[in-house]
Amino acid sequence: MSGNQRRAVVVGAGIGGLTAAVALHRRGWQVTVCERAPELTAVGAGIVLAPNALRAFDIIGFDVTRAAGSASPAALGLRRPDGRWLQRADTGAMTARYGTPPLAVHRAALTEALAAELPEGAIRYGAAVDDAEATGDRPVVRTASGEFTADLVVAADGIHSPLRRRYFPAHPGLRYSGETAWRAVLPADGPAPAAAAETWGRGERFGVVPLADGRVYVYATAVAPEGYRPADLHAELLRRYGTWHGPIPALLDRLDPAAVLQHDLHDLAAPLPRYHHGRIAWLGDAAHAMTPNLGQGGCQAIEDAVVLAHVLDGTEVTGIPAALTAYSAARCARTNALRVRSRRAGRIAAVTHPLAVATRDFAVRATPARTTRRAMDDLFGGMNGVPVAHVGSTGAAR
């Protein structure tokens, strides 16, 4: 190993952190990932990778369908609780417009595949980061099991990021969206839905996403007080969604309440002024936590990671602070706009008044599909910070 090899410590082994680690490793960095969990986990159950995230993976030569086993097309249509379609998904049109449809994968498969791209021992499990000192030429990351000195620290430490609080103490932090969410993956022991869809009711939503291996990713949201936790989860879900169109009742019958994850939905109350401090760079939820209404939280973390590796590519150690300034410039405006857009979309989807629901549903039905697709162009079609020329004909990075 060269004594001049650049060294990075990535704080957090989520999808964004692991993508950053893989991207940097493939550009010659020595990477250490510090993860507080004792082993690789897959909180979140499933994830839908939009075309922009798949393009980002292509740039670093990571093939999702090869590495993660199997992936299923997951363009979402919209329905009412009685089953009537508000808007049907057109997988073919999305493929023609963006090169690929969204793909659904299990988070465990994706994180395991990303971890497998790193050298043995690169991920240090059970290494919760107590602090990262950014002063001086080489940051120091402190954990209970020891210190790591590096040229770069990537703060991918999640929505409650301790490093964000440490370096942006005046930031107001998180705000509650007004909704709570439940998520689970059902085993492949029953009929699989024909297509992915999200159903909108009055202050309630239910999503169904078939996975390629026969399992089904389901999620639900409801307007509820922050911290609300039902005493009987299964009864709660049946009360809210049990009379909705098929196959939702049958899927609820297959649900194991112990396997359901519940999280209140938050986003950042205000944008961060920048995504770097000295030689520390923030990405994903740590930088721009957003609600899941656009399905872009994980996708933007993947974009962050690929852009970060790109601006650092070929940079001498002394040039890292300037490269991180370029990273902030490339990412802040896009991710902040999506954070605001996602919150606004959630407000529309979560309306409860019958007149507001009827108006919303009419507007969705009346909007031509081509108009909806054009509205997604800036979301799915672009990724600031990496020139298109860096994607070759095979999708691998040049």
Image (cartoon, rainbow, N blue to C red):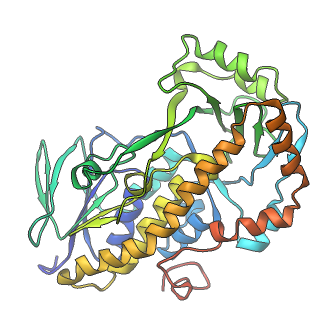
Give the side of residue 3 with respect to residue 376, left or right: left
Residue 353: quadrant of the picture: top right
Q: Name the residue rendered at 40%, 50% in the picture.
A: 14
Lateral position of residue 208 relative to residue 275, left or right: right
Q: In the drawing, does residue 70 fall left or right of residue 124?
A: right
Which of the 4 image quarters holds residue 65? bottom right
Image x and y of residue 393, in percent: 62, 85
Query: Visible in this render: residue 47?
Result: no
Q: Nearer the viewer, residue 209 or 76?
A: 76
Q: Residue at x 85, y 42 (%)?
A: 359
Of 158 and 167, nearer the camera is 167
List x then y, in percent, for residue 162.
26, 46
Residue drawn at (63%, 50%) of the image: 344
> Where 290 falls versus 382 (above or below)?
above
Residue 262 visible in this rendered orientation of the protein: yes
Tell me which residue sits at (16%, 76%) in the image.
1
